[in-house]
Image (cartoon, rainbow, N blue to C red):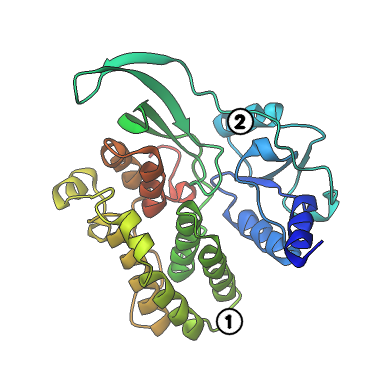
Amino acid sequence: MGLRGRVRALAERSPRPFVVSAADGTGDRLAVEAGLRERRWRPAVSPAETGVLVVCGRPGEALAGAIDLVWSAMPGPRARIRPDALDDIEPEGTRRRDAAPPDDAGMADRADDRDGLRLDVLHVPLGPVLADWPAGLRLDLALQGDVVQSAEALMVDTGGGPFWAGREAARRLDGVARFLRVAGWDAAARRAAVLRDGLLDGREVGSRFGAFERTVRRSRLLRWMTRGVGDLTPDAADRHGVPARYVGDVADRLDGWLRDIRLALDGSGPTGDGDDRDEALVSVLPDLATGADLAQARLIVASLDPDLGAVTADA
């Protein structure tokens, strides 16, 4: 067996926990991500491919019910563990490929598409138990083909306090890391997560961020994927109470995040509460997702990255 074969075999044997976070579980999630990285384990992208579930934070009733539904559909042997119990995971036998995804996609109706044809309308929920997804968010989509015809955004878990208060650059790096994983650029996402954790640990990351920023900005493929997607107009931002920094398309918002991080690291930009009005970011999602395809809808959500831990229960 060659080197590539040995690496592949090792990856197959390594545990791949599925990590889900409550709105108040950001700190636990970051610790789990660091623990997985230290062990050179990759998180599962779907609960159907693993028997290990890691729950971060204290889910409210609605989110707990969704987690229980996913747990009941996970393949066995299975284990549900605390964020601080990664060492309890068995090294083998935790990855399965033969189980169907547990999402309940509902039944298909019929409706006219834009060409006047009668096509199936499929009702699909995104979240709240989904990899690289804002904790506590559910986005209910009506799809014809892979195009979103309508959407409804729901906050099913909120509160716990603003974990990122006073840590604006780290929050943005966390958002960039999750955005890049959704975009399929795992190597760059890993670099962003390492920078985020270094910043939270009080280490100097400015020079490494500069190299990372240049890499991301030079990606023509990423620019092609994000330009013209999820364009938020000034009028729509004003109507929903969304801060002006989110105006533009997904590419503009990613550029803005990188710029904000650079300014914060240089000491010439905001380092405290960014006043993102996270409930407003949720309210604008249906407008931005409608007309996008399913992959674009995920990028749109990742480009807004609302923190529902900072939202009070009566928002």
The one nearer the camera, 266 or 159, is 266
- Residue 255 position (above or below residue 28): below
Look at 39% across and 38% down and name the residue there. Answer: 294
Q: Could you say where residue 201 lies in the image, as x and y percent from the top left?
A: 61, 75
The answer to which quarter of the image holds residue 51 is: top right
The crowd level at tag 1 (other Cα within 10 Å; few <14, some 14-19, many 20+) is few
**Horizontally, is 120 left or right of 132 in the view?**
left
Residue at horizontal 36 percent and vertical 71 percent from the top: 217
Residue 101's label in the rendered image is 2
Report the front residue among 207 and 306: 207
Is disc 2 surrounded by few (<14), some (14 to 19) or many (20+) residues within 10 Å?
some
Q: What amino acid is labelled 1 in the image?
A: Arg
Where residue 53 sits in the image (x, y, percent)? 71, 41
Under tag 1, what secondary structure?
Answer: loop
> Is mark 1 in CB contact (under 8 Å) with mark 2?
no
Identify the mark at residue 290; answer none if there is no mark.
none
Q: Element under label 2?
A: loop
The disc, 1 or 2, on the residue closer to the chain's N-terminal end is 2
Does the rendering let one see residue 164? no
Amino acid type, mark 2: Pro
Query: Marks 1/2: CA distance?
Result: 40 Å
Q: Which mark is residue 203?
A: 1
Residue 125 in view, yes or no: yes
Q: Which is more toward the observer, 1 or 226?
A: 1
Q: Which residue is at a point 65% across and 51% down the rendered structure image?
A: 43
Position above or below: 278 against 293: below
Q: Position of residue 123 (x, y in %)?
A: 41, 23
Outermost residue toward the front in this view: 1
